[in-house]
Amino acid sequence: MRLVGLTGGIASGKSTVSNLFMNTSVPVIDADVVARNVVQKCTGGWKKIVKAFGDEILLDNGEIDRARLSQIVFSDPSKRQLLNRLLGPHISSGIFWKIAKLWMKGCKVIALDIPLLFETKMDRWTNPVIVVWVNLETQIERLMSRDGCSEEQSQNRINAQLALDWKKSEADIVIDNSGSLDDTKQQFREVLRKVSEPLTWKERLRSRDGLISVVMCTAVGVLLAQKNLL
Ligand SMILES: CC(C)(COP(=O)(O)OP(=O)(O)OC[C@H]1O[C@@H](n2cnc3c(N)ncnc32)[C@H](O)[C@@H]1O)[C@@H](O)C(=O)NCCC(=O)NCCS
Ligand SMILES: Nc1ncnc2c1ncn2[C@@H]1O[C@H](COP(=O)(O)OP(=O)(O)OP(=O)(O)O)[C@@H](O)[C@H]1O
Protein backbone atom coordinates (compact mmCIF):
# COMPACT_ATOMS: atom_id res chain seq x y z
CA MET A 1 0.00 0.00 0.00
CA ARG A 2 1.19 3.48 -0.86
CA LEU A 3 0.25 6.37 1.44
CA VAL A 4 0.54 9.63 -0.45
CA GLY A 5 0.87 12.75 1.74
CA LEU A 6 -1.05 15.78 0.51
CA THR A 7 -0.31 18.96 2.40
CA GLY A 8 0.40 22.67 2.08
CA GLY A 9 -0.51 25.85 3.90
CA ILE A 10 -3.88 27.18 4.96
CA ALA A 11 -5.91 28.05 1.82
CA SER A 12 -3.06 26.96 -0.45
CA GLY A 13 -5.47 24.68 -2.32
CA LYS A 14 -5.29 21.24 -0.65
CA SER A 15 -9.05 20.69 -0.86
CA THR A 16 -9.01 21.89 -4.46
CA VAL A 17 -6.39 19.24 -5.33
CA SER A 18 -8.09 16.69 -3.10
CA ASN A 19 -11.29 17.18 -5.15
CA LEU A 20 -9.32 16.37 -8.31
CA PHE A 21 -8.50 12.96 -6.80
CA MET A 22 -12.21 12.27 -6.50
CA ASN A 23 -12.57 11.41 -10.18
CA THR A 24 -9.70 8.93 -9.93
CA SER A 25 -9.24 5.52 -8.33
CA VAL A 26 -7.24 7.06 -5.46
CA PRO A 27 -9.38 7.61 -2.33
CA VAL A 28 -8.58 10.62 -0.12
CA ILE A 29 -8.71 10.77 3.67
CA ASP A 30 -9.32 14.37 4.75
CA ALA A 31 -7.86 15.16 8.19
CA ASP A 32 -10.06 18.27 8.52
CA VAL A 33 -13.15 16.03 8.20
CA VAL A 34 -11.71 13.62 10.79
CA ALA A 35 -10.95 16.61 13.06
CA ARG A 36 -14.60 17.70 12.75
CA ASN A 37 -15.92 14.21 13.50
CA VAL A 38 -13.89 13.81 16.67
CA VAL A 39 -15.41 16.93 18.24
CA GLN A 40 -19.04 16.10 17.55
CA LYS A 41 -21.34 16.68 20.49
CA CYS A 42 -20.68 14.39 23.48
CA THR A 43 -17.71 12.58 21.92
CA GLY A 44 -14.44 12.24 23.86
CA GLY A 45 -12.86 15.11 21.89
CA TRP A 46 -15.86 17.36 22.54
CA LYS A 47 -15.71 16.68 26.29
CA LYS A 48 -11.99 17.51 26.40
CA ILE A 49 -12.53 20.81 24.58
CA VAL A 50 -15.42 21.84 26.83
CA LYS A 51 -13.35 20.99 29.91
CA ALA A 52 -10.36 22.98 28.65
CA PHE A 53 -12.09 25.98 27.03
CA GLY A 54 -15.30 26.18 29.06
CA ASP A 55 -19.04 26.23 28.17
CA GLU A 56 -18.64 29.57 26.40
CA ILE A 57 -17.09 27.65 23.50
CA LEU A 58 -20.48 26.02 22.79
CA LEU A 59 -23.30 27.12 20.50
CA ASP A 60 -26.90 27.03 21.79
CA ASN A 61 -27.34 23.53 20.31
CA GLY A 62 -24.33 22.24 22.26
CA GLU A 63 -22.03 21.92 19.25
CA ILE A 64 -18.58 23.52 19.32
CA ASP A 65 -18.59 27.13 18.08
CA ARG A 66 -15.81 26.68 15.52
CA ALA A 67 -15.61 30.37 14.64
CA ARG A 68 -15.10 31.25 18.32
CA LEU A 69 -12.56 28.46 18.86
CA SER A 70 -10.79 29.55 15.69
CA GLN A 71 -10.50 33.14 16.99
CA ILE A 72 -9.04 31.90 20.28
CA VAL A 73 -6.51 29.41 18.94
CA PHE A 74 -5.24 31.45 16.02
CA SER A 75 -4.50 34.46 18.23
CA ASP A 76 -2.92 32.56 21.14
CA PRO A 77 -0.19 29.96 20.42
CA SER A 78 -0.46 28.37 23.87
CA LYS A 79 -4.21 27.75 23.37
CA ARG A 80 -3.51 26.33 19.94
CA GLN A 81 -0.90 23.96 21.37
CA LEU A 82 -3.42 22.92 24.02
CA LEU A 83 -6.05 22.21 21.34
CA ASN A 84 -3.51 20.26 19.28
CA ARG A 85 -2.51 18.21 22.32
CA LEU A 86 -6.11 17.40 23.16
CA LEU A 87 -7.24 16.48 19.67
CA GLY A 88 -4.00 15.05 18.21
CA PRO A 89 -4.50 11.46 19.46
CA HIS A 90 -8.18 11.42 18.38
CA ILE A 91 -7.30 12.71 14.90
CA SER A 92 -4.43 10.22 14.43
CA SER A 93 -6.54 7.27 15.48
CA GLY A 94 -9.43 8.49 13.28
CA ILE A 95 -7.05 8.59 10.31
CA PHE A 96 -5.61 5.20 11.24
CA TRP A 97 -9.04 3.50 11.21
CA LYS A 98 -9.93 5.08 7.89
CA ILE A 99 -6.67 3.76 6.42
CA ALA A 100 -7.39 0.33 7.94
CA LYS A 101 -10.86 0.21 6.33
CA LEU A 102 -9.45 1.10 2.90
CA TRP A 103 -6.62 -1.42 3.39
CA MET A 104 -9.16 -4.15 4.12
CA LYS A 105 -11.01 -3.23 0.93
CA GLY A 106 -7.75 -3.83 -0.93
CA CYS A 107 -6.93 -0.19 -1.84
CA LYS A 108 -3.35 0.08 -3.03
CA VAL A 109 -2.88 3.86 -3.14
CA ILE A 110 -4.46 6.23 -0.59
CA ALA A 111 -3.99 9.99 -0.39
CA LEU A 112 -3.89 11.60 3.05
CA ASP A 113 -4.92 15.26 2.97
CA ILE A 114 -3.33 16.46 6.22
CA PRO A 115 -2.75 20.22 6.66
CA LEU A 116 -0.33 19.63 9.55
CA LEU A 117 1.47 16.64 7.98
CA PHE A 118 4.96 18.04 8.70
CA GLU A 119 4.03 19.71 12.00
CA THR A 120 2.74 16.38 13.37
CA LYS A 121 5.62 14.44 11.77
CA MET A 122 3.15 12.18 9.95
CA ASP A 123 5.23 12.74 6.80
CA ARG A 124 7.31 9.78 8.09
CA TRP A 125 4.48 7.47 7.07
CA THR A 126 3.84 8.94 3.63
CA ASN A 127 5.73 8.71 0.35
CA PRO A 128 5.61 10.67 -1.85
CA VAL A 129 4.68 13.93 -0.14
CA ILE A 130 2.83 16.39 -2.35
CA VAL A 131 2.92 20.03 -1.26
CA VAL A 132 0.31 22.37 -2.70
CA TRP A 133 2.15 25.67 -2.82
CA VAL A 134 0.90 29.18 -3.51
CA ASN A 135 2.63 32.55 -3.27
CA LEU A 136 1.98 34.45 -0.04
CA GLU A 137 0.07 37.31 -1.67
CA THR A 138 -2.37 34.93 -3.39
CA GLN A 139 -2.66 32.82 -0.23
CA ILE A 140 -3.70 35.85 1.85
CA GLU A 141 -6.10 37.07 -0.86
CA ARG A 142 -7.80 33.65 -1.14
CA LEU A 143 -7.95 33.16 2.62
CA MET A 144 -9.51 36.59 3.16
CA SER A 145 -12.05 36.08 0.43
CA ARG A 146 -12.97 32.49 1.43
CA ASP A 147 -13.19 32.98 5.21
CA GLY A 148 -14.08 36.68 5.28
CA CYS A 149 -11.21 37.43 7.66
CA SER A 150 -8.94 40.47 7.86
CA GLU A 151 -5.38 40.56 6.57
CA GLU A 152 -4.08 40.41 10.14
CA GLN A 153 -6.24 37.36 10.96
CA SER A 154 -5.08 35.68 7.75
CA GLN A 155 -1.46 36.32 8.65
CA ASN A 156 -2.05 34.87 12.15
CA ARG A 157 -3.48 31.69 10.63
CA ILE A 158 -0.58 31.41 8.21
CA ASN A 159 1.90 31.93 11.07
CA ALA A 160 0.24 29.09 13.00
CA GLN A 161 1.82 26.63 10.56
CA LEU A 162 5.36 25.90 9.39
CA ALA A 163 6.44 28.16 6.52
CA LEU A 164 4.96 27.04 3.20
CA ASP A 165 8.27 27.71 1.44
CA TRP A 166 9.98 25.29 3.84
CA LYS A 167 7.30 22.66 3.19
CA LYS A 168 7.91 23.16 -0.52
CA SER A 169 11.62 22.50 -0.01
CA GLU A 170 10.80 19.20 1.75
CA ALA A 171 8.29 18.01 -0.86
CA ASP A 172 8.74 15.12 -3.27
CA ILE A 173 6.21 16.74 -5.59
CA VAL A 174 5.13 20.39 -5.69
CA ILE A 175 1.90 21.65 -7.19
CA ASP A 176 2.06 25.40 -7.79
CA ASN A 177 -1.52 26.54 -7.27
CA SER A 178 -0.81 30.27 -7.70
CA GLY A 179 -2.29 30.29 -11.20
CA SER A 180 -5.65 29.31 -12.63
CA LEU A 181 -7.56 26.16 -11.80
CA ASP A 182 -6.83 24.85 -15.30
CA ASP A 183 -3.14 25.32 -14.64
CA THR A 184 -3.45 23.26 -11.45
CA LYS A 185 -5.49 20.57 -13.22
CA GLN A 186 -2.73 20.26 -15.81
CA GLN A 187 -0.06 19.75 -13.11
CA PHE A 188 -2.36 17.30 -11.38
CA ARG A 189 -2.42 14.98 -14.42
CA GLU A 190 1.36 14.46 -14.11
CA VAL A 191 1.08 14.04 -10.33
CA LEU A 192 -1.58 11.37 -10.76
CA ARG A 193 0.66 9.53 -13.21
CA LYS A 194 3.50 9.54 -10.64
CA VAL A 195 1.44 8.39 -7.67
CA SER A 196 -0.16 5.65 -9.78
CA GLU A 197 3.16 4.14 -10.83
CA PRO A 198 3.50 0.41 -10.00
CA LEU A 199 4.02 -0.27 -6.29
CA THR A 200 7.52 -1.03 -5.04
CA TRP A 201 8.14 -4.42 -3.35
CA LYS A 202 7.85 -2.86 0.10
CA GLU A 203 4.57 -1.18 -0.82
CA ARG A 204 3.25 -4.45 -2.27
CA LEU A 205 4.06 -6.26 0.96
CA ARG A 206 2.19 -3.61 2.91
CA SER A 207 -0.94 -4.02 0.80
CA ARG A 208 -3.70 -6.46 1.76
CA ASP A 209 -3.05 -8.73 -1.25
CA GLY A 210 0.70 -8.66 -0.57
CA LEU A 211 0.19 -9.71 3.03
CA ILE A 212 -2.23 -12.47 2.01
CA SER A 213 0.37 -13.77 -0.51
CA VAL A 214 3.07 -13.80 2.19
CA VAL A 215 0.80 -15.64 4.64
CA MET A 216 -0.21 -18.18 1.97
CA CYS A 217 3.40 -18.77 0.88
CA THR A 218 4.50 -19.18 4.50
CA ALA A 219 1.66 -21.64 5.19
CA VAL A 220 2.49 -23.68 2.06
CA GLY A 221 6.20 -23.62 3.01
CA VAL A 222 5.45 -24.88 6.53
CA LEU A 223 3.15 -27.64 5.19
CA LEU A 224 5.76 -28.81 2.68
CA ALA A 225 8.48 -28.78 5.32
CA GLN A 226 6.28 -30.84 7.68
CA LYS A 227 5.53 -33.33 4.88
CA ASN A 228 9.23 -33.74 4.14
CA LEU A 229 9.99 -34.25 7.82
CA LEU A 230 7.36 -36.99 8.22
C1 LIG B 1 -9.31 25.66 14.70
C2 LIG B 1 -10.60 25.06 14.20
C3 LIG B 1 -11.67 25.09 15.28
C4 LIG B 1 -11.08 25.92 13.01
O1 LIG B 1 -12.24 25.32 12.47
P1 LIG B 1 -12.77 25.79 11.02
O2 LIG B 1 -14.02 25.02 10.74
O3 LIG B 1 -12.87 27.28 11.00
O4 LIG B 1 -11.63 25.41 9.97
P2 LIG B 1 -11.18 23.95 9.45
O5 LIG B 1 -11.31 22.93 10.51
O6 LIG B 1 -11.86 23.67 8.16
O7 LIG B 1 -9.60 24.17 9.23
C5 LIG B 1 -9.17 25.05 8.22
C6 LIG B 1 -7.68 25.05 8.15
O8 LIG B 1 -7.11 25.65 9.30
C7 LIG B 1 -5.83 25.14 9.51
N1 LIG B 1 -5.75 24.61 10.89
C8 LIG B 1 -6.70 23.93 11.57
N2 LIG B 1 -6.28 23.63 12.79
C9 LIG B 1 -5.02 24.11 12.88
C10 LIG B 1 -4.06 24.10 13.92
N3 LIG B 1 -4.30 23.52 15.09
N4 LIG B 1 -2.87 24.70 13.67
C11 LIG B 1 -2.60 25.27 12.50
N5 LIG B 1 -3.49 25.32 11.48
C12 LIG B 1 -4.67 24.74 11.67
C13 LIG B 1 -5.64 24.02 8.48
O9 LIG B 1 -4.94 24.50 7.37
C14 LIG B 1 -7.04 23.67 8.09
O10 LIG B 1 -7.10 23.12 6.79
C15 LIG B 1 -10.41 23.59 13.69
O11 LIG B 1 -9.61 23.58 12.54
C16 LIG B 1 -9.79 22.69 14.74
O12 LIG B 1 -10.47 22.17 15.59
N6 LIG B 1 -8.47 22.49 14.63
C17 LIG B 1 -7.72 21.60 15.51
C18 LIG B 1 -7.61 20.24 14.87
C19 LIG B 1 -6.54 20.20 13.85
O13 LIG B 1 -5.37 20.19 14.18
N7 LIG B 1 -6.94 20.19 12.55
C20 LIG B 1 -6.00 20.04 11.46
C21 LIG B 1 -6.00 18.61 11.00
S1 LIG B 1 -4.35 17.97 10.84
N1 LIG C 1 -6.19 27.85 -8.67
C1 LIG C 1 -7.12 28.55 -8.02
N2 LIG C 1 -7.64 29.68 -8.57
C2 LIG C 1 -8.55 30.43 -7.89
N3 LIG C 1 -9.03 30.14 -6.68
C3 LIG C 1 -8.55 29.03 -6.08
C4 LIG C 1 -7.59 28.18 -6.72
N4 LIG C 1 -7.30 27.17 -5.88
C5 LIG C 1 -8.04 27.36 -4.77
N5 LIG C 1 -8.80 28.47 -4.90
C6 LIG C 1 -9.70 29.01 -3.87
O1 LIG C 1 -8.89 29.35 -2.76
C7 LIG C 1 -9.53 29.02 -1.54
C8 LIG C 1 -8.64 28.06 -0.75
O2 LIG C 1 -8.57 26.81 -1.43
P1 LIG C 1 -8.79 25.44 -0.65
O3 LIG C 1 -10.01 25.52 0.19
O4 LIG C 1 -8.68 24.34 -1.65
O5 LIG C 1 -7.51 25.48 0.28
P2 LIG C 1 -7.08 24.50 1.46
O6 LIG C 1 -5.62 24.40 1.39
O7 LIG C 1 -7.86 23.24 1.39
O8 LIG C 1 -7.52 25.35 2.72
P3 LIG C 1 -7.57 24.91 4.28
O9 LIG C 1 -6.16 24.82 4.73
O10 LIG C 1 -8.24 26.03 4.95
O11 LIG C 1 -8.32 23.64 4.37
C9 LIG C 1 -10.89 28.44 -1.91
O12 LIG C 1 -11.86 29.45 -1.83
C10 LIG C 1 -10.71 27.99 -3.35
O13 LIG C 1 -11.90 28.01 -4.09
Image: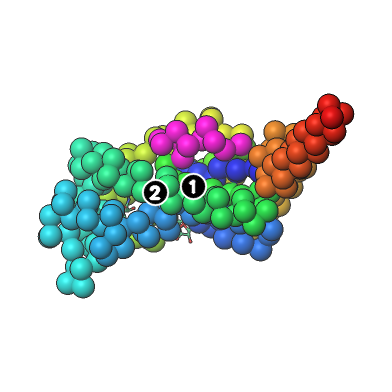
Could you tell me if residue 130 is visible in this image? no
Residue 39: x %, y % from top left: 31, 58
Looking at the image, is mark 1 or mark 2 earlier in the sequence? 2
Residue type beneath disc 2: Ile
**126 inside magenta stretch:** yes
Q: Secondary structure at mark 1?
A: helix
Residue 104: x %, y % from top left: 62, 53
Residue at horizontal 66%, vertical 63%? Answer: 23
Task: Give the extent of the magenta segment.
Answer: 117-127
Q: In the image, 59: left or right of 207?
A: left
Q: Quadrant of residue 88?
A: top left
**228 inside magenta stretch:** no
**Residue labelled 2 has its Cβ within 8 Å of some atom of ligand 1:** yes
Q: In the image, 63: left or right of 201?
A: left
Residue furthest to the top: 229
182 w.r.t. 229: above or below: below
Residue type beneath disc 1: Phe
Q: In the image, 189: left or right of 141?
A: right
Q: Quadrant of residue 150?
A: bottom left
Residue at horizontal 43%, vertical 58%? Answer: 33
Q: Residues within 10 Å of mark 2 (few under 14, many from 20)?
A: many
Query: Which residue corresponds to mark 2?
Result: 91
Q: Please tell me the numbered disc located at residue 96.
A: 1
Residue furthest to the right: 228
